Image (cartoon, helix red, strand yellow):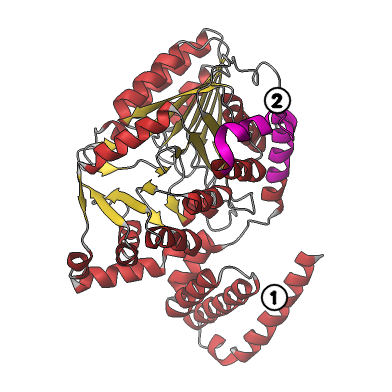
Amino acid sequence: MKNTVRVVIFLLVLSILLFAFKNQLESGILGFLSVMISLSVIFIGFVIFLENRHPTQTITWLVVLGSFPLVGFIFYLLFGRNYRKERMFRKKYFLDKQAFLTIEGENDPRSEEKLQLMGEHQGKLFMLAQKLGNSPISFDTATKVLTNGEETFSHIMEELKRARHHIHLEYYIIRHDQIGQEIKNILIEKANQGVKVRFMYDAVGSWKLSKAYINDLKNAGIETVPFGPVKLPFLNNKFNFRNHRKIIVIDGNIGFVGGLNIGDEYLGRNKDIGFWRDTHLMLRGEAVRTLQLIFLQDWYYMTNHSFLTAEYLSPQIDHKSHGGVQLIAGGPDNEWSVIKNIFFSMIGSARKSVWIASPYFIPDEDIFSAIKVAALSGIDVRLLVPNRPDKRIVFHASRSYFPELLEAGVKVFEYERGFMHSKIVIVDGELASIGTSNMDMRSFHLNFEVNAFLFRTKSTQKLVAEYLNDLEFAIQLDLKTFQQRHLGYRLLESTARLLSPLL
């Protein structure tokens, strides 16, 4: 009914505007195209205005559409349509929530015991995460931080070769290069041994993945599914909502999550990029069930095939205390912007320090204010970012935030030893986040992401040590010097920041 009313209103507006532009239409094809673009821009602006988005986003879109009608029109078709409340996402959200509550349990019988282990200060944060993400905290999960590509892929391939029952992979980018070929060969070998292999890749992130690669997997009996396939980008309402997750689950007992996709550049083999600094996490034990659930629900969303059975959801648990581990999935299907709100709570809960590492730093106003307020309160706030771009618009947009941060007392460091791609948040040296989510609006609002939140684990201690080590390869920005950068750069940064709600 609502759609019918919208169509009627649109047709009425269109009829009125066509009559108003009657003379221009009579001037030929160019006049007709000009009128149609103008009508489209006016209509889109009207729709954006009624969507009640954040004022910053609304103003940005109206400025872009008004200043660059044709480019703005194309950008809106590609990136601007707000489908957060569309039925396809609402359905996924409710199905995922029901699955999590059924498998993980709506009321954790050990919740009070766990809160006592954490104390009131951090306990509230994990209760928030459980309420928003429907995932409990586990104290029966061992974790290991994997530094950079060599360590990460050596562990991944070693565990893949040990698989006996199933292998589940879900990645944003998979390349048909040397490491991609090595992973493929292992998967095919395991499939030939009778191991069930399911392989999911994002259709946009992996758009360069060759058909030969996929066919080799399929011919070996491996189930292969693209997430959010896009045939007509301008007409496909899922083009802008991508699966940025990096997940591997092996036999339901071993899990991997973090910043590395599958490609040679993550091993430093791309000469243009050079050394690639990244961080991944290996999990063993109870929390792997949550990672498995995230994969299985994504698989169900794309295939309508459900595998919520004990053979996939019964990890081996050694019941040794390893510290707290909580896996949280975020995405455009959840109205609460789960990971962003947990980051906000982490920053707000800090008593001593907030250390952030992110390759793409484009915070929304909530996170930006939280970071500045923490620094102004005397908390040791540090931000580690790359000093070289792999995405120029995002790079320059990020730098536009630095003057305000520096003025507030945030210590900003630029990593110089290659490209820094780690996605880390560490609070008070005892609470940490590691996963796929960047500190940017796309990760907060548009991408499907997954992060592990750690409390007083050995992995947390290692993340602290590695962060300090990374600072040895970084330069600290000085406010006075940074303000003296060339006017051209400042104009470029301001322009890029104007587009930041769209990035």
Magenta range: 92-120
Quadrant of residue 487 within the rendered picture: bottom left
Outermost top residue: 193
Circle 1 crowding by C-alpha within 10 Å: few under 14, some 14–19, many from 20: few
Callout 1 secondary element: helix
**Side of 156 where 274 appears, left or right:** left
Q: Is residue 194 above or below residue 425?
A: above
The main secondary structure of the magenta stretch is helix
Name the amino acid type tagged 1: Phe
Q: Which mark is residue 10?
A: 1
Which of the marked residues, 2 or 1, is nearer the chain's N terminus? 1
Tell me if mark 2 has few (under 14), some (14-19) or many (20+) residues whose alpha carbon lies within 10 angstroms of its own.
some
Residue 135 location, x and y as percent? 63, 36
As drawn, 63 above or below 236: below
The residue lying toward the viewer, choosing from 310 and 83, is 310
Residue under the point 75% across and 31% down:
102
